[in-house]
């Protein structure tokens, strides 16, 4: 039987959207905030020679600069004021989530409700400033040691440049953090995710145009181009399917008596997502794999040289067998680790017992927690393998098949996931708007019937 909510969701159309004034205001606010973000990615940081930096960026685009530039929407390539993007805030949020699971004080704060959440958010902001300051200072040092045929990247090296770089980049990150919070509160969707999404999507048109340009010049065969486009659609469909996949555990509630009436026990479901960790495992794995490359670049920039570090960087290069093996292993490890952090089987079992729910055939309490953990472990393994395949696919095609397939990996995961979440929020706003309309009509009918009886 189709529920009333499902019927309303099926009837959502553009007519309902045109009447939802509040939703339209939220969408316009979101679009305006994202336009402000995109404008900021074109404002250059002071003290940089753009020609010399462009040459340095081309030489290091395959390392840490290339990955950060992808999430920053090209801000690193232009060394803009938003070059750090929102990544320090994401790193701080992840660290605070991990600390909440090991620190009794933070765990107690998390259980205090809204007040505790605000306090943890404040700690996250402080940690964001610290991380952004360290990264900005490292970028300043690296820029001062970079030079090419066009000359030095920094026009006037020194402490004034370093301090101005730290202030500019930290200020840009904090502004984006504030902008993301405003989008979440006054717009549609998660603001932080939408900022990253906007940066990734901004680079997709140029990548697609580059593919067609390769096909036009004959560097890429037309049948191969069609295969790449079909493969891209297949990857998107696979991501949508796997991100929506759930394992539902049946929950039964016992019969209850209210007065002289006996109510039948209700049945519900406990949904367990196939990919509970989301895009966190690929992000963590990519960041850790790029640490040796970053250290080598800073070492070369400061005039030093370590042979063992250079050997490690060569072995961990894109497409190398060691890189792929470690990348897959780290994705699987972080998928299990982060799932254990965000989902506590013991707490879930305690909540079920508290409200009288139970899994048929499973004893409440510890046995229920063990069964939930058993099921979650099995489906997390499937989700981790799915993440590894999606992220390693472009690496294999580029390294071994010489195919320019740039539509996989973390960027496509983030783009598809954020799109699905934003569309779901828009549908929930439309659903709430239609419910409000039904309630108003019911009140008007009730008032008219009462006046008619009078």
Image (spheres, rainbow, N blue to C red):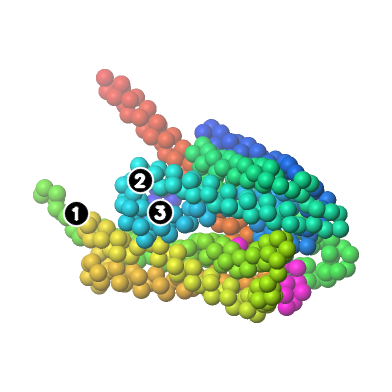
Image position of 282 with respect to 122: above or below: below
Question: Toward which corner of the image does residue 230 lie, by quadrant?
Answer: bottom right
Residue drawn at (80%, 57%), measured in percent from left and top?
147
| Marks 2 and 3, the one that precedes in the sequence | 3
Mark in front: 2 vs 1: 2
Compared across the picture, whether 307 is left or right of 91 comes to: right
Instruction: Return the x and y of residue 17 as percentages of the image width and height.
Output: 55, 39
Q: How many marks?
A: 3
Disc 1 is placed on an element classified as strand
Residue shown at 14%/53% (left/top)? 257
- Under circle 2, the secondary element is helix
Q: Position of residue 206 (x, y in %)?
A: 76, 55
Bounds of the magenta span?
398-410
Q: Nearer the viewer, mark 2 or mark 3?
A: 2
Work out whether residue 384 can be spotted: yes
In the picture, the quarter occupied by the C terminus is top left
Q: Is residue 408 magenta?
A: yes
* Badge number at residue 2: 3
> Which labelled disc corresponds to residue 263?
1
Q: Which residue is mark 2?
A: 116
Mark 1 vs mark 3, CA separation in Å:
22 Å
Q: CA distance from mark 2 to mark 1?
A: 38 Å
Task: Residue at 31%, 22% (x, y): give it.
Answer: 452
Query: Image quarter for residue 416?
Result: bottom right
Q: Residue at the location (63% across, 68% down)?
A: 292
Alpha carbon separation for disc pair 2 and 3: 39 Å
Q: Decide if residue 125 is on the left or right side of residue 442.
A: right
Q: Quadrant of residue 1?
A: bottom left
Residue 362 percent across, percent down from the top left: 25, 71
Taking 257 as reference, is 243 left or right?
A: right
As rendered, which of 273 and 411 lies closer to the eye? 411
């Amino acid at each position: 039987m189709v529920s009333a909510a499902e019927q309303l969701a099926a009837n959502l159309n553009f007519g309902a959207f045109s009447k939802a004034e509040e939703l339209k205001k939220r969408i316009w606010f979101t679009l305006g905030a994202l336009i402000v973000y995109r404008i900021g990615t074109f404002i250059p940081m002071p003290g940089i020679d753009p020609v010399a930096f462009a040459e340095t960026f081309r030489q290091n685009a395959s390392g840490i600069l290339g990955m950060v530039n992808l999430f920053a929407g090209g801000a690193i390539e232009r060394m803009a004021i938003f070059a750090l993007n929102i990544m320090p805030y994401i790193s701080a949020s992840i660290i605070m989530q991990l600390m909440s699971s090991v620190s009794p004080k933070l765990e107690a704060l998390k259980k205090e409700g809204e007040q505790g959440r605000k306090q943890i958010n404040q700690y996250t902001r402080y940690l964001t400033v610290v991380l952004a300051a360290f990264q900005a200072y490292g970028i300043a040092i690296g820029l001062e040691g970079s030079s090419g045929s066009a000359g030095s990247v920094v026009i006037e090296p020194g402490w004034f440049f370093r301090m101005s770089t730290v202030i500019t980049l930290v200020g840009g990150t904090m502004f984006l953090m504030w902008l993301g919070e405003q989008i979440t509160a006054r717009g549609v969707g998660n603001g932080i995710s939408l900022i990253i999404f906007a940066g990734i999507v901004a680079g997709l048109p140029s990548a697609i145009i580059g593919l067609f340009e390769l096909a036009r010049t004959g560097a890429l065969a037309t049948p191969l181009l069609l295969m790449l486009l079909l493969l891209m659609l297949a990857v998107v469909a696979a991501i949508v399917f796997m991100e929506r996949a759930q394992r539902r555990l049946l929950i039964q509630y016992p019969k209850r008596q209210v007065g002289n009436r006996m109510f039948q026990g209700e049945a519900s479901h406990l949904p367990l997502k196939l990919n509970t960790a989301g895009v966190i495992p690929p992000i963590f794995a990519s960041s850790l794999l790029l640490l040796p490359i970053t250290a080598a670049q800073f070492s070369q920039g400061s005039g030093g040289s370590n042979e063992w570090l250079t050997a490690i960087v060569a072995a961990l290069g894109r497409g190398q067998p060691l890189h792929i093996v470690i990348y897959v292993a780290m994705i699987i490890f972080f998928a299990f680790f982060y799932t254990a952090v965000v989902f506590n089987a013991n707490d879930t079992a305690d909540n079920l017992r508290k409200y009288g729910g139970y899994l048929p055939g499973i004893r409440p309490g510890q046995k229920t927690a063990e069964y939930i953990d058993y099921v979650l472990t099995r489906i997390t393994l499937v989700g981790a393998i799915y993440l590894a395949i999606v992220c390693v696919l472009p690496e294999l095609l580029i390294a071994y098949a010489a195919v320019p397939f740039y539509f996989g990996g973390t960027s496509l995961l983030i783009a598809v996931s954020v799109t699905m979440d934003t569309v779901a929020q828009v549908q929930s706003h439309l659903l709430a708007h239609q419910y409000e309309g039904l309630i108003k009509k019911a009140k008007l009918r009730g008032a008219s019937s009462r006046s008619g009886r009078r």
